[in-house]
Image (tube, grey):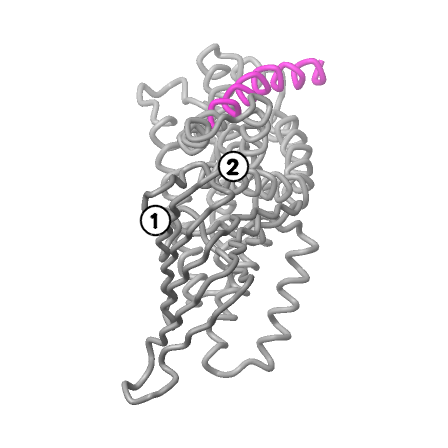
Amino acid sequence: MHRILQRYFLYNFIGPFIGANLFFIAFLLTFQLFRIMELVVQKNVEFLTILELVGHICITFIPMATPLAGFFAIIFAMGKMSEDAELVAMKSLGFSKLQIFLPFLITGLFVGAVLLKVNQNIIPYSQRVFKTQVLKLSSKSLLSEIKPNQFFSDIPNMVLFSEEVKNDGKDLKKVFMSFEDKKLEQVITASSGQLIVEEEKGTTPKIFFRLKDGVVLKTKKDFSYDSPSRIQKINFEEYFFPITSLSGGSVKVSKDSTLVSEELKKKIKTLEKKMKTAAASKKEGIRRSIAKATLELFNRYNSPIQFFLFLIVGFSIGQKNMRSQKQSGNSKSFVFVLVYFLFFFFCISQAKKLVISPEMAIFFPTIAGLGYGANLFRKLDWNS
């Protein structure tokens, strides 16, 4: 009898849980679709490539969508059973609130274990594939925008002019380039040039110019006017000029979110070793890098705990008191989600500023939430 009823509890939960998961993933996906469609418009992208991009970005939304889906699904399930007086019937059969919660607890442990596994390897892999593919498509669309006898300035800090452009922007004739960074200004003229894109799996595409038969004029910004070496002229037969940023800045595929957990742990250890020998002026920057990497690592362990937190809170506030005319479960749920995530992201911002430790930033809001959920569960009016 108990097993049949517990399966019935899960039946009321699983459907809304899957539906809510799909809804939150679709909602989060809309913010990325504009970026993907921009690439599709700029460059003819194959349909299978678009599906691959959408699939990978959907996978990366799972850790955020799943706890919220579980939260609203269990509120819906418990609210429905309360309205239909099914919880009253279960109480009359001798069910305790712990027995009602048991199937949800087992489901939470199972989903949490899956989340933990997915967070370690699958999601970082999907992050890496998505960002790499977007960079490749961006670089291809960038090449097609180089036109003959027109100034091209879409590459940050650089202006390019070529009298003749062939092969979708890859082959150039009579090239003029002006490049500026924090320390140096360069003007380059060449009889011909090639724009080369080197793609390596899992890394940022490398883009550089291969120029032939020209002159480079380099001017230092931090010079004294009486310095004889402030301007340098170089004649060359072949010159390789790297481009490190695209369309307003490069996206690093090696960022923390794209590293599997083992790679992330190695990065943290390497930064900690570097910290010991670094100069005092560089230590703060290394501390910030360690904090960001540690936040990413700990957050992967926090998602399964978040799922259990939302289950116990949703179970408690989803039940309705049949004797009361005031039903405030929905408002409580939205207030709880809002307060929790505001507190959570505030703590993360403080950890990035080195005000608090990454451990406290990630786990303290969740532990506080678990305390709140346990208190709600303890006070649950099971006799109403």
Q: How many marks?
A: 2
Q: Nearer the viewer, residue 302 or 61?
A: 61
**Amino acid type, callout 2:** Asn
The residue most toward the left is 225
Q: Residues within 10 Å of mark 1 (few under 14, many from 20)?
A: some
Quarter of the N terminus within the rendering:
top right
Q: Does 98 sit left or right of 156 as displayed?
A: right
| Magenta stretch holds residue 94 | no
Q: Secondary structure at mark 2?
A: loop
Residue 350 picture location, percent across and down: 40, 61
Check the image and report above or below for 49 versus 229. Answer: above
What stretch of residues is rendered in magenta?
A: 1-24
Give the residue pinned by disc 2: 167
Q: Which mark is residue 207?
A: none
Q: Residues within 10 Å of mark 2 (few under 14, many from 20)?
A: few
Q: CA distance from mark 1 to mark 2?
A: 19 Å
The residue most toward the bottom is 226
Foreground: disc 1 or disc 2 = 2
Check the image and report above or below for 227 versus 273. Answer: below
Q: Secondary structure at mark 1?
A: loop
Mark before the other along the chain sequence, 1 or 2:
1
Residue 166 picture location, percent across and down: 48, 38
**Amino acid type, callout 1:** Ser
Q: Which SS type dominates the magenta stretch?
A: helix
Q: Nearer the viewer, residue 173 or 197?
A: 173
The residue most toward the top is 84
Residue 377 in sight? no
